[in-house]
Amino acid sequence: MEALDPLEAYDEMIFQSESDDGFEGSVFDPDTQLDAELTAEGDRILDRLQCLDCLSALWEVAATFPLPTSTARRKLPAKTAATWRTLLDDRLTAMSA
């Protein structure tokens, strides 16, 4: 008995692409305009995230900055207020660096 070659059944078949994407072959060439749009959107999102990061750092400084009580505020010496202002300026300078 003769052994049958399983690939013989496909000898007379012709491949017809059903993808209908307008490209011949198996490799898709991406649209460069789409790439530019994605890059622009990525830059926009990055700018927004940097802004939010800065805002959160400012809130952290505001939340941890010691404030005097209402009675102590009336008796607060000018030297203490200047010290606090210097401390705040130093923290803001460190954050912007």
Image: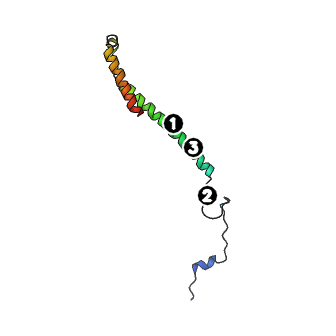
Amino acid on which disc 2 is placed? Asp
Query: Disc 2, disc 1: CB below 8 Å?
Result: no
Q: Position of residue 25 (x, y in %)?
A: 63, 65
Evaluate whether residue 48 shows in this view: yes
Evaluate whether residue 60 shows in this view: no
Residue at 39% x, 29% y: name it. Answer: 93
Q: Determine which quarter of the picture holds residue 30.
A: bottom right
Residue at 42% x, 29% y: name it. Answer: 58
Residue at 56% x, 42% y: name it. Answer: 41
Q: Determine which quarter of the picture holds residue 9.
A: bottom right
Residue nearest the observer in this picture, 28 or 50: 50
Earlier-in-chain disc, 1 versus 3: 3
Mark 1 and mark 3: Cα distance apart in space: 13 Å
Query: Disc 3, disc 2: CB below 8 Å?
Result: no
Sort mark 1 into few (<14), some (14-19) or many (20+) by Cα contacts within 10 Å: few
Identify the residue under disc 2: 29
Amino acid on which disc 1 is placed? Arg
Locate the C terminus by quadrant: top left
Locate the N terminus by quadrant: bottom right
Identify the residue under disc 1: 48
Earlier-in-chain disc, 2 versus 1: 2
Residue at 31% x, 10% y: name it. Answer: 75
In this rendering, the answer to whether 80 lies above or below 51 is above
Residue 17 in the figure: left or right of residue 61 = right
Q: Position of residue 22 (x, y in %)?
A: 68, 59
Residue 97 in the figure: left or right of residue 16 = left
Identify the residue under disc 3: 40
Determine the residue located farthest toward the bottom in the rendered image: 1
